[in-house]
Amino acid sequence: MSDAFEELINNNPEWKRHYELIRTLGGESERGMAVLVGAELDRALELVLHAYLAPGKARTELFSGSSPPLGTFSGKINLCRVLHLITDGECAALHTIRKIRNEFAHNPSASFANAQIRSWVNILKSDPEQDHKAKFEIEAAGLIASLETTAVDQAHGRVYEESYNNWYRRGADPDAKPFGSKEEAALAYQSKETDTAAR
């Protein structure tokens, strides 16, 4: 890797994460890659939701326990969309990737050469010259990186904007002052989450 390219990646969190993911996914089998992509996207969606939803026991219970309300990949995708934390295009891509992940997880003979899987991969926006495995890999890595960086940052920004518009969430402190920045909003949520976990 050239020094210029390394500097570019290190100075851009989304590019860096994208690059790291492609290196990781490239070493997996088709099945391993599809299952890993599903797990990484599920985790990334949870990060986005954690950045926006008010911290505390109620939020924790949405994601944990024996049968949590947001325990499914599909549930996280749909909630992120209705809260406008992801776009229509991201939602559609996530559901397509979810179908592909499920096929690999439940069908031992699943392959990117399979007609059904190829048709799903063709829905994703990728270079038509690439093979289906590469299309899936690149689209998924880009989506994971985007959710972990841009979507999480925008979710924190939403909390900040809502505080400035004097739109306080029910149950929040009515005397609370607006946050000065989205970073301040993120830190406030993180500290509240830490306090709740310590109880």
Image (tube, rainbow, N blue to C red):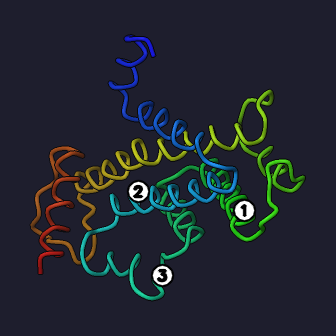
Q: Quadrant of the C terminus?
A: bottom left
Q: Give, as a three-letter code, the residue at label 2.
A: Val
List the single residue furthest toward the right.
Answer: 115
Examine the rendered structure and indicate whether residue 70 appears above or below residue 46. Answer: below
In primary-sequence order, the first of circles 1 and 2 is 2
Indicate left or right for 133 with 50 as reference. Answer: right
Q: Please name the residue that numbered disc 3 is placed on.
A: 69
The nearer-to-camera label among 1 and 2 is: 1
Residue at (39% x, 85% y) in the render: 65
Residue at (75% x, 64% y) in the render: 103
Q: Nearer the viewer, residue 37 or 128?
A: 37
Examine the rendered structure and indicate whether residue 27 appears above or below residue 77. Answer: above
Q: Residue 36's image quarter?
A: bottom right
Q: Which mark is residue 104?
A: 1
The crowding category of the residue bearing disc 2, from other C-alpha atoms within 10 Å (few below 14, some 14 to 19, many at least 20), is many
List the single residue furthest toward the bottom.
Answer: 66
Mark 1 residue element: helix
